[in-house]
Amino acid sequence: MGMELLGSEFLGEFYTAADAARARREQLEGILKTLGWIAQVDAFQHWLYAHPEHKESERDATWRQLSDRFGGAVDWHGYEPARAKQWHRQLHIFLHPFYYIEYGIAQLGALQVWANYRRDPRRGLAAYRAALALGGARPLPELFATAGCRFDFSAETLRPLVALVQEALDQP
């Protein structure tokens, strides 16, 4: 994911300016949409396992509440039954519980690598390469720190990253 963001800076080498801009926009918009979905799926899974005796109606109500919290301003009027079962589209819930959050962790790191690169390309890339050189030999917080990133999911970490994405989306 980090390499995708770094590489997106150079799409103009291969595509027309319009196609490169469209691809960057779709990538950045997709990241923002996906982060909300990942948070919703993870919160839902935590609720499921914390309430093993829940009823279907409680599950539906919880998903709707989480959808309101993380899902944005989509008008589901007339489609409430489909909305309540929307979580079925995430196969990880059934086959790989609590794995989907890994994508959110990876995206958080990727956004920070990209932010570091945009601030100081040489230094940002050197830190990223140093983290890659460690591979899977070190725990995630150490890999993040080596890359010049924070292993933190707070608003303090996310807010400037989302602002950077918004700034990039606002550019022509």
Image (cartoon, rainbow, N blue to C red):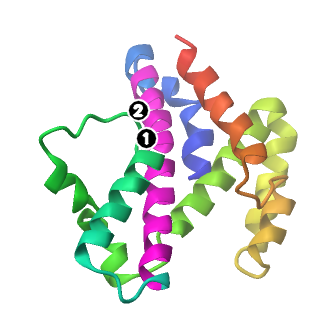
Q: Is residue 40 highlighted in magenta?
A: yes
Neighbor class of circle 1 (other Cα within 10 Å; few <14, some 14-19, many 20+) is: few
Is disc 1 placed on a helix, strand or loop?
Answer: helix
Neighbor class of circle 2 (other Cα within 10 Å; few <14, some 14-19, many 20+) is: few
Quarter of the rendering containing residue 86: bottom left
Residue located at (37% from left, 33% from top) = 73
Q: Is residue 170 highlighted in magenta?
A: no
Residue located at (43% from left, 56% from top) = 66
Query: Is 107 left or right of 66, judged from the image as shown?
Result: right
Quarter of the rendering containing residue 79: top left
Q: Magenta span covers which residues?
A: 21-49
Can residue 60 be seen from the camera position used here?
yes
Q: Are marks 1 and 2 in contact (CB under 8 Å)?
A: yes
Pick out the residue farthest to the top.
172
In the displayed structure, 19 sits above or below 116; it is: above
Q: Amino acid at mark 2?
A: Glu
Q: Amino acid at mark 1?
A: Gly
Is disc 2 placed on a helix, strand or loop?
Answer: helix
In the displayed structure, 24 sits above or below 89; it is: above
Q: Where residue 89 sits: x, y (%)?
A: 25, 63
Q: Where residue 22 sits: x, y (%)?
A: 40, 23
In whole angstroms, how far apart are the C-alphas of marks 1 and 2? 6 Å
Q: Where residue 36 sits: x, y (%)?
A: 48, 49
Residue located at (46% from left, 84% from top) = 49
Between residue 14 and residue 26, name the one nearer to us: 26
Query: Is 154 left or right of 98, judged from the image as shown?
Result: right
Can residue 99 be seen from the camera position used here?
no
Q: Which mark is residue 30?
A: 1
**Dot 2 corresponds to which residue?**
26
Between residue 151 and residue 13, name the one nearer to us: 151
Q: Where residue 118 sits: x, y (%)?
A: 75, 31
Query: Is 118 left or right of 56, judged from the image as shown?
Result: right
